[in-house]
Structure formats: structure tokens, C-alpha cells
Amino acid sequence: MSFNKTYIAFYALFLLSFIVFISNPSDASEKEEEKRQEYLTHQPEHNTAERADPLDLHFSIGLMEGYDSNANLDDSGEIDDVFTQARFNAHLGYPTESILNVLVDYGFTGVFYSDYTDASLLDHRMRPGIGFKPNNDLEFRVFYDFEALRYPENDDADYNSNGIAAEVEYRLTKRIRTKLEYEYLVRDYTVRRSLDGGGNIVSSARQDDRHRISGELRFYFDRSMLKIRSGYMRNDSNMVFQDYYDYEGLNAAVSYTQIITEKLYAAVSVNYMRTSYKSRKVSAGDETQRDDFCSPRVLVFYDITKDLTWLLTYSYNQADSNDPGQEYSGHMVTSGLYYSF
């Protein structure tokens, strides 16, 4: 596979900094996936690498209301709508030996739009794994990753995903940590069929193979944290027609979290993605399609009690492309409560 100068520059940055992050790149023809990522990241993070008790078992439940200015992700005919978002997360960490831990994470997200129900989704994810921690500074983890994503009113986008992931986390200093990860997954669509070279529907379901390399650097200060992330991924599909879903993605992101008072804290972040398709042509012309996606976000948290947190988020999404029909923009506001126990 050939790489242009843009990719070479990104790889040089990666090798120099060892800062790597991955998220699913924006596939403009599969806008549901972008929407899913928007929801699945609206949540306080839990660091599974820091476990003080012998048995680490906890849960969180969230309920939020939101407004979406462009629910159908289409600037030519924007549809704004309100939605309800429900979450449940469970985490288990159990040491079988002094340096070996069993890890299990489960997450459910449900998003229910009031009018534009095609964007409503149900997402289940299970991630069991094993962690090996030879000392206080270094930990290796291996996971099996399963996901089942369903769109009740748009089953053409439904899929099951199975993958394996390996990651290493290292504490460089007392205030600096780094993490690197590789993941390979296979995504099987439950309804959508593949197309042959002539654009004809075939009997086999669409299937995607994905390779991702990812990671991050985290800087801890007395009352704040800075996180820098970047990464690369490649998607290969059995959709033969124009290699329609074969693409490479590059990602860069930065986030900053600040403790304001004992109960109030805030975070700001910016995420950028570049998606370059292997053969897909723009709708009017002979260029290969290329998409750019940028999303700044602001989050405010307030701890009502030690277990109950109020969350307010605002995000703006801007998708640019050399295919004008794939461009869109919009903003989203959500507010709600998380209960952890």
C-alpha cells in the first residue's frame, strides 16, 4: 500500500513523540458511525490501570437529555431533534496473583431520538482481558473485544464486531504516563450485503477487517491533566465495488481537564481525523475521496455527592471533504446525571 507525503509526515511525528491514539475514522458514507462515537465518548473516563483494592468492582448509571442541531448529518437538509441517552457501565478487576489481574468491562449505551428515529441506537460492548504488572511502573494488558451495535429503525447499519487488543502502559515519571495499543478486529454486518466489481449485490454480507495502532501521553499536574493522542488505522472491506470501504485514517487529539473547586471540574478537547480512501471517487470528478473531521468539545462536571455527578457537554462537529455532498456541520448539547457505586 502506497503512502503520500501527508502519511510520511504523520509517521515521522509518531516515531519522534511515541504519542499514539486511535478512534474510528469518519466514513462519510456511514454517518451512523460518527454519531455513535459522539455519544460513546460523552462520559467521564475510568482508568482501569489504577487499582488499589484487591477486588475492584464498580458500576455507573447515566441518564441524559440532549439537543442535536443536525441529527441526519446533512447540510442540504438539516433535521434538528432532541434525544434521551441512557448508559450502564460495569468494571471488574481481580488479582489472581500478585502481578496478574483479570479485567472485565461491560458497557451499554442507548440513544433514543424523538422524531428522527433513524439515528437511535443500542450499543453493547464486552471487553474481558488479563493484565500483567511486573512492577508499579509497567503494565501489559491483553483483551478480547466484542461489540453489538443495533439501529432499531435502520438495521442496514447493524453489526457485530470481534477483536483482540494488546496494550502496554508505562509510567515515565511520577507525573507522566504513556500507553501504546494495537488492535485487530473483524466487523460483520448483519443485514448489509456486499457488492461485486460491477456494483451488483451478492449473497455474502459485508465484512470489514481493521488494524489500529493507538496510544497516548498523559501529564498530571496538581489540579489538572493534559492528554495528547494520535494514531493510524486501516480498514479493508469485502465490498469489491470501487473498494468502497477501503481507507486509511489518521487521528490527532488533545484534551485538558482542570479541577476548579472540590466538587466542580471542567474539560476541553479537540479531535481531528483525516480519512483517505483507496479508490472511491468523488461524486463529480475523478479525484479519490478524502475527508477531514474536527470536533471541539467542552465538558463541565459537578459532584452533587461523592456518588452522584451532574454533567453538561457542548460539542461542535465540522466535516469537510473534497466531495461537497459529504460535508456537514452541527452542534450538540447534553445534560444529565451519573450515579456511580
Image: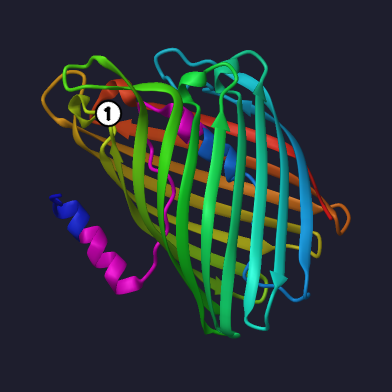
In the figure, 48 relative to 152: above or below? Answer: below
Counting from the top left corner in percent of width and height, residue 45 is at 64, 56
Quarter of the image where one finds residue 256:
bottom right
Q: Which residue is drawn at 47% across and 67% down?
A: 167
For residue 173: magenta?
no
The answer to whether one can see residue 281 in this image is: no
Furthest toward the right, the residue is 305
Q: Judge from the rendering whether residue 302 lies leftward or rightward of residue 253; answer left or right.
A: right
Query: SS at mark 1?
Result: loop
Residue 95 visible to the viewer: yes
**Residue plotted at (60% across, 23% down):** 120
Please tell me whether residue 30 belongs to the stretch shown in magenta: yes
The image quarter containing residue 307 is bottom right
Measuring from the top left, give residue 201's x and y in whole percent: 29, 15
Percent of width and height locating residue 341:
84, 55
Query: What residue is shown with label 1?
Result: 239
Give the residue at x 66% y 37%. Answer: 109
Magenta-drawn segment:
9-35
Q: Name the residue located 66 percent from the left edge and 72 percent from the top edge.
A: 50
Q: In which quarter of the image is residue 285?
A: top left
Q: Position of residue 116 (x, y in %)?
A: 58, 15
